[in-house]
Amino acid sequence: MSHRIAAVHARQLWDSRGRPTVEAEVRLENGAVGRAIAPAGASRGAHEAIDLRDGGAAFGGMGVAAAVANVAREIAPALSGMDARDQAGVDAALAALDGTPTKQRLGGNAVVAVSMAVLHAAAAGEGVPVWRWLAQDRRVRLPLPEIQIFGGGAHAGRRTDIQDFMIMAPHAGSFRRALEVTDEVYRAAGRLMEELGPLAGVADEGGWWPNFASNGQALDVLTRAIDAAGHRAGEDVFISLDIAANEFGDGKGYRLALDDRAMDGAAMAETVIGWTRRYPILSIEDPASQDDLATMATVTGAIGDAVQVIGDDVLVTRAARVEAAAAAGACNAALIKVNQIGTVTEAKAALDAARAHGWGTIVSARSGETEDVTIAHLAVGWDAGQFKVGSFTRSERMAKWNEMLRIEEAMGQDAVFAGPSAFAAPVAARLAR
Ligand code: PGA
Ligand code: ZN
C-alpha cells in the first residue's frame, strides 16, 4: 500500500489559553490519517520560528486564518505525492517552500502542525504508535519528568521573576511512580500555601499561583513541601527552576522585581549560583538572557559539574545555536520544542547536536497547549531522557502525562526509566547511590 500523501487539510482550533491555533490533518493513499495541533509559547526567544497571526480586531489579533489558508494553498500541493515515511524529505520541502529562517512566511504554526501530522500519518500507515515508529529497533527509555509546582513569570502576571518552580524525582524508579511523587508534593505545596497566606488559584501551566514575598520564599516553601510530602529534599526529590531570565534581563542587566534588585550579568550568575547552594536544586533553565552566553558560561562553569544547566530561549531548538553554546561552555542540557524551529527533523537535529556534546535533552511543551500528545511520543521515541510539560493539573498537561503512562504500560517488561541516566555525566554522577 502506498504511503504517499494524498491530502493535507488544516483548521483553526483553540488552545489552553483560549487562543486560536492550527490543527493539520494528513491523509495517505493507504487511508492512514495523522493529526497534530501547533502549541504556542508566551516567554518566547527572539530567534524562534514565528507563528503567523492575522492581527486586526478579531481574537485579539491572534487569528490563524492566513496560516490555515497557507496549508490549503501552498503546503498541500507541495507535499502531495510525497512518501510520509520520508520525514526528512517532507520537512526539507516545508522549509524550502517557506524560504525564511523563521518559517514566518507560511507561519511556524502552519508548518509545525503539518510536520507533526505527517509523522502521525506515517506511523499510522505502519500500524505502530509514533514512539515506536521513531525508535525503530533501538532501546528507548521512559523519560524523567520535571513537573511544575508553582508557575510564575510570564505565566502568572510576573508575580515572581522565576518562571517555573518544578520538581524532579530521579530515583522514582518508574515514570508512574514519578507522577505519584509529584502529586504528593503538589498537594503538600497547596496545603502549605493555604497555611501561609492566600491561595490564589493556578497559573498558565496549572501550577499554584506564586503568591510569595520573594523568589527565595518560593524556594523555601517548595523545599518544605517536598519534606512535608514525606520525601527527602536533595536526596529523593529535587528542585528544578526555569529562570527564563530573558523575560527580565538582557546582556546589559537583569532586574528581579520581586526582590527589588537590579544586577549585571556577573551578579545574576552569583544570585543563581547562590540559590543552587542554599536549596536542593538539580536543574536550572535559562539563568541568563538569550544572547548572554557569557553569563550562561559563568553559571555552567561554576555549578555544571553538579547541576543541570538547560538552554531554552538561548538555543531555541537550533542545532547551530547548540554548537555555539557548546563552544562557549554555556549549557550542559538542551530544551527541545519542535515549534521553536518548526519541523520534526530540525528539532531532532538540535537534540542530536546536544547529545553529541554529552548534554542532557528535554522534550518540552509550551505554555499554550492542547490535547495534542505528540511530544510524549517524541520524548520516548527519540530517547530524550527528560520530559517537561508544565504542572500536574489541567487536561492539556495531564493528556501528556497520561499518554506517557500508556506508553509505559505498552512497553511492559521492556520499560526502563531514565532516572539519573537522563543527565550529563557529571550531574548523573552526583546522583549515583
Ligand atoms: P513558553 O514557556 O512556552 O511560554 O515559551 C515555556 C518555557 O519557557 O520553557
Ligand atoms: Zn524555558
Image (spheres, helix red, strand yellow):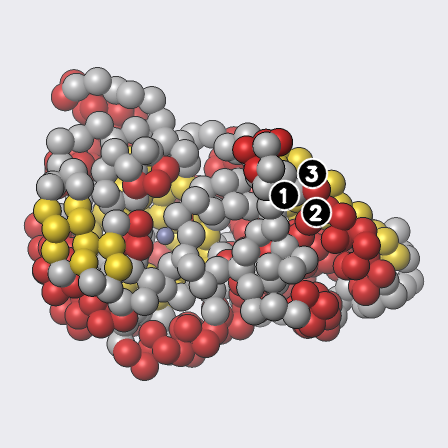
- CA distance for labels 3 and 1: 12 Å
- Say which quarter of the image contains residue 151: top left
**What residue sits right under mark 1 in the picture?**
54
**What residue sits right under mark 2 in the picture?**
66
Determine whether the residue tagged by mark 2 lies in a helix, strand or loop: helix
Few, some or many residues within 10 Å of mark 2 (<14, 14–19, 20+) = some
What amino acid is at disc 2? Ala
Few, some or many residues within 10 Å of mark 1 (<14, 14–19, 20+) = some
- CA distance for labels 1 and 2: 6 Å
Which is closer to the viewer, label 2 or label 3?
2
Mark 1 touching mark 2, by CB under 8 A? yes
Q: Position of residue 322 (x, y in %)?
A: 40, 73
Q: Position of residue 285 (x, y in %)?
A: 30, 56
Residue at image location 27% in from the left, 70% down from the top: 293
Q: Is mark 1 within 8 Å of ligand 1?
A: no
Marking on residue 208: none
**What residue sits right under mark 3 in the picture?**
12
Residue at image location 77% in from the left, 59% down from the top: 75
Determine whether the residue tagged by mark 3 lies in a helix, strand or loop: strand
- Say which quarter of the image contains residue 160: top left
On-image quarter of the C terminus: bottom left
